[in-house]
Image (spheres, grey):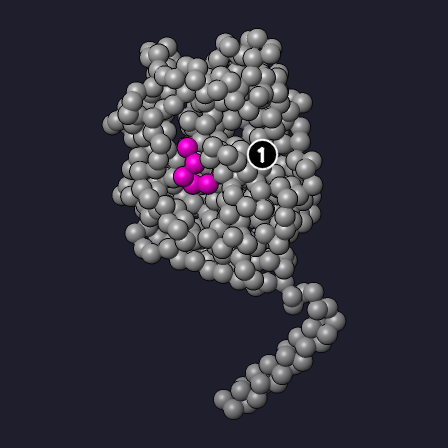
Amino acid sequence: MKKTKFLIASGILAVVTLVAIAADHIDAPAVQGGTSDITDFYAFQGENSSNIAFVANVQGLLSPGDATSNAAFDENVMIEFNIDTTGDNVEDLVIQAVAKEGKIYVFGPSVPGQTGLNSTVLSNSINQLSVDITPYGQDAIVESSGGIMAFAGPRDDPFFMDFAQYGQIIAGNATGFNDPGSDTFAGTNVMSVVVEVPKSLIGGSGTINTWVETKRKQ
Amino acid sequence: MNFKYIKLFTIAVLVAFSAVNCNDDDDNINMQPMGPDFSGTYTQEDQMGRPAVNTVFVSSGMKDIFNTTIPSQQSASFQSMFQTNLEALSPAYNDPTDANALGLTSAQFTGLLATDVLNVSLDGTTTFFDGTNVLTGRALADDVITVELLLIFGGEDFSENPSLSNDNVDANDKAFLSSFPYLATPW
């Protein structure tokens, strides 16, 4: 059932067994290679400067072809963007994304019923929309509602790093990076969820603290 | 045959009437969105704020615990581990007054990193570091690994340990899009 296909041929596997990898790819034993493994998180001002875009990537190092076309969002895994607007590193708002029957359902930004490690789906949120998961090889399908935009599907992994050489340095086999380096993540895909929201829905101005979580249905 | 249809019609009317009554009784029931079952409790498995934090600063054996510790408790639980691991990785930090280009000592830098959240400005440029703005977000094109290597190995002015403070991979292998969803199409 393992959906992530490692690039065994290029020798990466030998490196990842020595140290955990990269941005957050395969960062910990309980999640590595599974459907809840976060590979990356981004938050930045959108093309419309009144908006912030949130990006969560999961299931990294998908090879082009079968590995990517067979990859799927796990319907029992919630991807939750957490937003702290008050500076105490406790979430005041969340945006939840859950896959069901070929769509991603997005709820929020909304105040969660409880903070912390356990969540219920905020299916009564005033802010909600769904979007068809874009199939591999097709144009991006985007839905918007109330100023909120959503996308879900396979994309090129936006992360770049000479992870292989970092592994050599940490292992004591090299004293520094090469110049030029070699992007270990070149030519690999991830499963992406992108949600863009008006800044007015997440505090309006100032600085927020934000992080992404994956949570599995019990 | 006709009688059957009349019976069905009567039942349909009665059902419709009852449904209207229910609707009048409790609007909330009918405001529930139709669709999939979203019931149940979801429990945390992974989390991430800034790039590479768990990978670089959390000792093996503790990585799952870090992923299931809420950010407001991470500094209390993990800052000293972060500091030990930073000083092992970059021994210049063993001098408690030694600082990186942000002016942060080992204790201060790991105090910042141990709370693994991404700070995002709602008032303008959003970047991990662009030469001017620091930790105001994370854009797709930000060379976050080189920024982190510089802050770990580069010393006060980014000049120390040049062979360790840049991986010399400065950009993605595909161009990003200027419009939503911004990420490049898959390979």
Residue B147 is situated, as x and y percent measured from the top left of the image, at 45, 27
Q: Residue furthest bottom?
A: B2
Q: Amino acid at mark 1?
A: Val
Q: Nearer the viewer, residue A56 or A2?
A: A56
Residue A159: quadrant of the picture: top left
Q: Secondary structure at mark 1?
A: loop
Quarter of the figure that contains the C terminus of chain B: top left
- Work out whether residue A122 can be spotted: no
* Main SS of residues in magenta: loop
Answer with left or right where residue B120 lies relative to residue B143: right
Q: Depth check: B136 or B14 in front?
A: B136
Residue drawn at 39 percent across, 51 percent down? B178
Crowd around label 1: few <14 · some 14–19 · many ≥20 (10 Å): many
| Residue B34 location, quadrant | bottom right
From what the image shows, is residue A154 above or below residue B14?
Answer: above
Q: Is residue B17 visible?
A: yes
Q: Which residue appears at 66% of the width and 75% of the height?
A: B19
Q: Is residue B80 above or below residue B142?
A: above
Most distant residue in the left direction: A9
Looking at the image, residue A45 sits to the left or right of residue B68; the answer is: left
Nearer the observer, B67 or A74: B67
Marked residue chain, label 1: B
**x, y percent for residue A90:** 67, 38
Along the line of sight, the residue nearer the viewer: B170 or A3: B170
- Give the magenta range: B138-143
Residue occupying the point 58% across, 37% down: B119
Q: Is residue A155 magenta?
A: no
Q: Position of residue B44 (x, y in %)?
A: 58, 36
- For label 1, the residue is B117
Name the residue located 67 percent from the left edge and 65 percent from the top edge: B29
